[in-house]
Amino acid sequence: MPVSLMSLWMPIVLSGVFAWIASALIHMLIKYHNSDYKQLNQEHEVAMALRQSADKPGLYSTPYCSDMKEMNDPAVQQRFNEGPVEMLTIMKDGMSPMGKLLGQQL
């Protein structure tokens, strides 16, 4: 017996709202991901270096390879082995607008 999508709109909306509330509780009350983030040993110095570099907001990685073929280059492999190997997200300066971000999740 086929079921139309229109007859399922309420369960779809309710499950989305329930998932959003559960996620908010898990992250804000239980603080599930707090242990995922760590402080850098020299946070101030790293922040100063990043300010001086004036990179725009975006996702960065080091060592950077524009093509996977570069991974075969011994010099690139050495940079990976020497480290650090990192993924860096640079966001706009200032506090994140939490209300706007939460609203965009709906």
Image (spheres, rainbow, N blue to C red):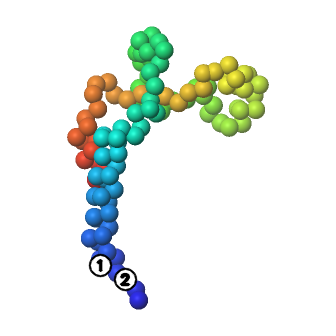
The picture places residue 101, in percent across and down from the top left corner, at 28, 42
Asked whether the beta carbons under mark 2 and mark 1 sit within 8 Å of each other, the answer is yes
10 vs 75, nearest the viewer: 10
Residue 49 shows in this picture: no
**Image height check: is 35 above or below 2?**
above
Q: Is residue 42 left or right of residue 68?
A: left
Is the residue marked by circle 1 packed among few (<14), some (14-19), or many (20+) residues within 10 Å?
few
The picture places residue 62, in percent across and down from the top left corner, at 58, 26
Q: Name the residue furthest bottom.
A: 1
* Residue to which mark 1 is pinned: 7
Q: Is residue 43 left or right of residue 106?
A: right
CA distance separating discs 2 and 1: 7 Å
The picture places residue 80, in percent across and down from the top left corner, at 67, 25
* Dot 1 amino acid type: Ser
10 vs 61, nearest the viewer: 10
Rendered residue at 45%/10% (across/down): 45
**Image height check: is 2 above or below 62?**
below
The secondary structure type at the circle numbered 1 is helix
The mark total stands at: 2
Q: Which mark is residue 16?
A: none
Residue 33 shows in this picture: yes
* Residue to which mark 2 is pinned: 3
17 vs 100, nearest the viewer: 17
Which image quarter: residue 98?
A: top left
Rendered residue at 30%/41% (across/down): 29
